[in-house]
Image: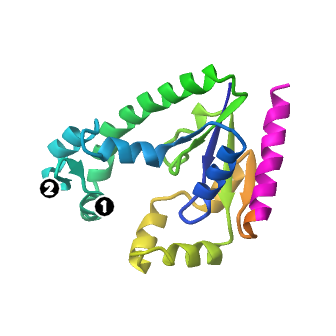
Amino acid sequence: MMRVGLTGSIAMGKSTAAEIFRRHGVPVYDADAQVHQLYAVDGAAVPLIAELLPRAVVEGAVDRAILKQAIAEDGTLLSEIEAVVHPLLAQSRHAFVEAARDTGAAFAVFDIPLLFETGAEADFDKIVVVSAPAPVQRARALARPGMTEDQLTYIMSRQIPDAVKRRKADFIIDTSGDLEDTADQIRSVIEKLTSMQG
């Protein structure tokens, strides 16, 4: 089974792209959703985060707002959190692969926001990058509830530039058009990936 990484910088339309792949019956692993599960009550990451930053655990779950604030204040905290969360994500990814393989899927998509930033590209056979022009990205990001200029600047400083991601991609989905245009591009990618499986 081919492993396809799906990534893109903030507000590029990655979640929308993942949902379109899903609608076409493609198994999709959602790294963000897995992190939410790990941070929820009884989540496997909760006791580990509690050791690193006790105040970030509220009523038995990780409070992502407190965690985000603490990471912004302490430059070393993010790498410490990643060191405990990434092995748990690797376990959930392995379980997903086994389940997808059992369904006979020709390929599976892995929706991973920081795919290049975490050096994970070697884990995938092909990589799809969602992209849009910088002004479109900026407008979308700033339209999100609670997003500020400072926050956006910080987030983008931690992400590899879009131009670099595009160069590393096997497929690029331009999400600057309407939803139908994005869906057409994804259908074309699905056809190409399917034909690669012969």
Q: Earlier in the sequence, mark 2 or mark 1?
A: 2
Q: Residue at x 15, y 42 (%)?
A: 51
Give, as a single range, the part of the protein colored magenta: 180-198
Q: Nearer the viewer, residue 133 or 15?
A: 15
Residue 49 horizontal side relative to residue 128, left or right = left
Q: Amino acid at mark 1?
A: Lys
Res. 68 mark: 1
Q: What SS does tag 1 mark?
A: helix
Above or below — where is 81 with respect to 142? above
Task: Residue at 48% x, 25% y: name it.
Answer: 95
- Viewer-nearest residue: 167 or 37: 37
Q: Position of residue 5 (x, y in %)?
A: 62, 41
Q: Residues within 10 Å of mark 1 (few under 14, many from 20)?
A: few
At x 45%, y 72%, the residue is: 152
Rendered view: 54 above or below 122: below
Q: Please name the residue that numbered disc 2 is placed on.
A: 55
Where residue 168 appears, as percent x and y from the top left, is 68, 48
Q: Main secondary structure of the magenta part?
A: helix
Report the label total.
2
Residue 135 screen position, x and y as percent? 63, 78
Q: How is the image coloured?
A: rainbow
* Quarter of the image where the N terminus is located: top right
Residue flagged by tag 2: what amino acid is it? Answer: Arg
